[in-house]
Image: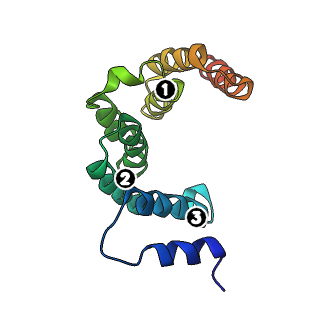
Amino acid sequence: MRPCGLLALEKSAAGERVTRYHLEAGLAAAHALAPSPEQTNWPHILELYDALLALDSSPIIALNRAIALAQVQGPDAGLRAIAALKDRRTLEHYHLFHAVHGHLLEAAGRITAAVAALEQALKLALLPAEKKFLAGKIERLGQ
């Protein structure tokens, strides 16, 4: 028996037009159906982000695509995608932009740059849980 959410997704896919809502539902389903983070179908997620970016060139969508790209092709590919963001300035005050950048820098072995990006994310973060997570990661990288 298929879960209700997947049945609704299948029904919504009827028709000839694919909308951002179909793609976003597909992304949510791909993440929800992954048995574990390591078994996530990142190539499929990257395809969905490519299609979504074709419909909406939002810098947030482009940032999320960079994450998927890094999962498929490695952190350097994700870093290149971040460097190529058209509206990067609009993300300068978005803590998750700096957190993602820091994570990819860390994965690429660029620890000093990663700490700097994570420190910027920490300055911009509002939620106590996010601040605690970022501070802990900065501390671990500094050791």
Q: Which residue is mark 3?
A: 34
Q: Residue furthest bottom?
A: 1
Residue at 29% over, 51% down: 55
> Sequence-wise, which precedes: disc 3 or disc 1?
3
Mark closest to the chain's N terminus, 2 or 1: 2
Amino acid at circle 1: Gly
At label 2, counting other C-alpha atoms closer than 10 Å, the crowd grade (few under 14, some 14-19, many 20 or more) is many
The number of numbered badges drawn on the structure is 3
Residue denoted by label 1: 102
Image spot of residue 102 (x, y percent): 49, 26
Q: Quadrant of the C terminus?
A: top right
Classify 17 as above or below 121.
below
**Which residue is identified by label 2?**
49
Callout 3: SS: loop
Q: Position of residue 8 (x, y in %)?
A: 56, 74
**Left or right: 66 as drawn, with respect to 127:** left
Which residue is at the front of the view, 122 or 90?
90
Question: Comparing marks 3 and 2, which lies closer to the viewer?
Answer: 2
Mark 1: few, some, or many residues within 10 Å (few <14, many ≥20)? many
The quadrant of the picture occupied by the N terminus is bottom right
Secondary element at tag 1:
helix
Quarter assignment of residue 139: top right
Could you tell me residue 86's position as x and y percent?
26, 30
Q: How is the image coloured?
A: rainbow
25, 114: nearer the viewer: 25
**Which three-letter amino acid code belongs to the residue tagged 3?**
Ala
Measured Cα–Cα span from mark 3 to mark 1 = 25 Å
Residues at badges 2 and 1 in contact (C-beta under 8 Å)?
A: no
Q: Residue at x 47, y 73 (%)?
A: 12
Instruction: Give the alpha-carbon distance from disc 2 to disc 1, as whole Å.
Output: 21 Å
